[in-house]
Amino acid sequence: MIDDVPPYAVVAGTPARILRFRFDADMIAALQEIQWWNYGLSALDGVDFTDVRTAVPAIERNIAIGHAQPLDPKMICFVRDEQPAIGKANPQTGDLELVPLA
């Protein structure tokens, strides 16, 4: 790839080309507007992912009522070789350190 891929585009080939978009332009705009990626899993509580047209309003509702908590990128849970760990940013270096969960 030498260029950015547009949001929700499906690309393939060498050189890569856009085959299609996962959603129509209005739905892509709605997904970008709510910025669901800035929230933790609480934004997705009760959301039916089988239909994006109902999922977006449900996520918007979770955000509007304060149920959706902003994502805290300083801590991320990983599972590696079936061993869960928390990834925490080292405040001095900014490096991600994995701390096994007991």
Image (cartoon, rainbow, N blue to C red):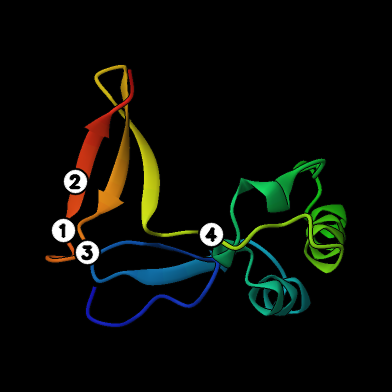
Mark 4 burial class by Cα count in 10 Å: few <14, some 14-19, many 20+: some
Instruction: Compute the Cα span from label 3 to label 2.
Output: 10 Å
**Residue identifier under label 4:** 71
| Dot 4 amino acid type | Leu
User: Are the residues tagged 3 and 2 within 8 Å (C-beta)?
Assistant: no
User: Are the residues tagged 1 and 2 within 8 Å (C-beta)?
Assistant: yes
The residue lying toward the viewer, choosing from 25 and 45, is: 45
**Residue identifier under label 3:** 91
Instruction: Compute the Cα span from label 1 to label 4.
Output: 18 Å
Secondary structure type for disc 2: strand
Q: Quadrant of the C terminus?
A: top left
| Dot 2 amino acid type | Glu
In the shown orientation, is residue 24 left or right of residue 38?
right
**Residue identifier under label 1:** 95
Q: Mark 3 or mark 2: which comes first in sequence?
A: 3
Secondary structure type for disc 4: loop
x 39%, y 46%: residue: 76
The residue lying toward the viewer, choosing from 75 and 26, is: 75
Which mark lies nearer to you, 3 or 2? 3
Relative image position of residue 17 (x, y in whole percent): 38, 72
Instruction: Compute the Cα span from label 1 to label 3.
Output: 8 Å
